[in-house]
Image: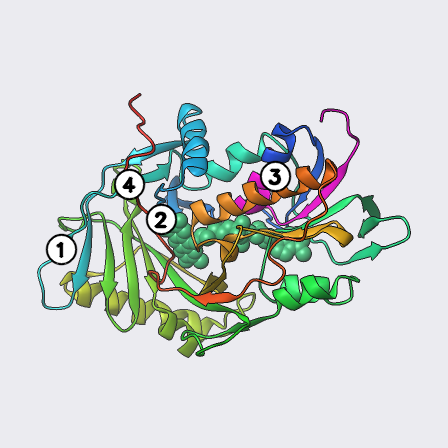
Amino acid sequence: MSGTGISVAIVGGGISGLVCAARLAQLGITNSVVFDTGKHGPGGRCRSRYISINGKLHIFDHAVQFFTVSDQRFAKIASFLHNKKTVKLWHGKIVRLKMGKQPEEIKNMQMFIGTRGMQAIPECLSSLVHVEGHKWVSSVHWDPLNKKWQVDDNWFDYLVVAHNGKCASRLMEHSGAPLIHNLLKVKFGPVLSPQTQVMQLCSLWVLLFALQQKVALSYDGAFVEHPDVSWIGNNTSKYCENQLECWTVISTKAFAAKHKVPQEFIPPSKEKEVTNLLLNGFSEVTGIDRKTLTPCFTKVQLWGAANPLNVLQGEGCVFQASHQVGICGDWLVSPCIEGAAVSGLSLAEVICRHVQGERRDVGLKNHLQPLETEAIGAFPTSKKLFFNPNK
Ligand SMILES: Cc1cc2nc3c(=O)[nH]c(=O)nc-3n(C[C@H](O)[C@H](O)[C@H](O)COP(=O)(O)OP(=O)(O)OC[C@H]3O[C@@H](n4cnc5c(N)ncnc54)[C@H](O)[C@@H]3O)c2cc1C
């Protein structure tokens, strides 16, 4: 399909949008542009922070901690990223921590991490496609006469909405594609309302902290049962660094709902309160004396639209043939890197079939189904090892 001249605007440069663009290019549709707001690069919820402490850079994964592979199509992407030295197997010890109980090791889960933090993944994918970074798309409009999308000041044949939350709903509200806007309506909360047919997202707080001295724990990461903390992860052991000890602590959904503030403006008093409460939680679940937890660096962040609690089950994406518009994202498959990637792949293939003449809507009538996952997302695994990095 090379040289079709077909143009695609992809609004959102998370894993789903980047994979969608890369797959379109592979299928011959090379004229696509990924627009992403990220100030420091695309990646969305799959990014890391490189923080200078005492003049040295330290890697902190502040959202995605690791990913798993269960889908054959995603295994090919993981294999590609592995060959590019973008991801590697993580042999860290992951446990389940319940207060007052011995840590329970989680075995038989093949885990992958970026080689320079999780951010290595979007960096590699964005090298394959055209990304307009640090770019906020503020208006999109369907012109039914010319069958084109106006995206801010530019015109495209197809539009892909590769993000969710309030931004996506607002962007599509007056776009001329009401069916698509309807699916993007969203509400927020830690517990899914029964029978809801609206996408529901939870929020999560993240605390990053560094200690001068190593703490003696027998594990590198833990899913935690605690009212305030859902995950703790040791970035220093993960990335084999030997300076300070850098930890990520991720809150529970309930904690985030209780302490919700505008994520762009966190009042200093809330920052202090959340830091203190999550450090208390870390101390309680690890058994490390709180008085000895005196970080030389702390930073908190609120992911207002962290993870979906329900997914629109079906073919992995949504597409309205008459309007040449589609949606991809983790909430159409599963809240994880694999889910986002599979959704991006699916939509690229649907667009390609539409270019070839197929006129079929996808997913417009599907229903939202509740989903039970870890607070930080899903970790799909398969008994069959799809991906053997030693091959
Ligand atoms: C705290 C946390 C921990 C997690 N841990 C894990 C984990 O360990 N393993 C795992 O597999 N998954 C994990 N996840 C889930 C994983 O991060 C997501 O499933 C995945 O990254 C979603 O990708 P996406 O492309 O669907 O969306 P996103 O990553 O949200 O990408 C959307 C992009 O669109 C951009 N955007 C929005 N509006 C506009 C606009 N108007 N113009 C331009 N750009 C716009 C956003 O800035 C963003 O970059 C975690 C999520 C969170 C929040």
Residue lying at 64% horizontally and 61% vertically, measured from the top left: 168
Q: Which mark is residue 65?
A: 2
- Label 1 vs label 4, nearer the camera: 1
Please check the rendered image and state whether residue 382 is part of the magenta-colored stretch, yes or no. no
Mark 1 or mark 4: name the one nearer the start of the chain: 1
Q: Which residues are magenta?
A: 1-22
- Which three-letter amino acid code belongs to the residue tagged 2? Gln
Mark 1 or mark 2: name the one nearer the start of the chain: 2
Disc 1/disc 2 C-alpha distance (Å):
19 Å
Disc 4/disc 2 C-alpha distance (Å):
10 Å
Task: From this view, report whether residue 210 is shown above or below residue 170.
Answer: above
- Label 2 vs label 3, nearer the camera: 3
Reading the image, the residue beneath label 3 is 349
Residue lying at 78% horizontally and 66% vertically, measured from the top left: 174
Q: Residues within 10 Å of mark 1 (few under 14, many from 20)?
A: few
Residue lying at 79% horizontally and 44% vertically, measured from the top left: 156
Hey, which quadrant is residue 75 in on the image?
top left
Reading the image, the residue beneath label 1 is 104
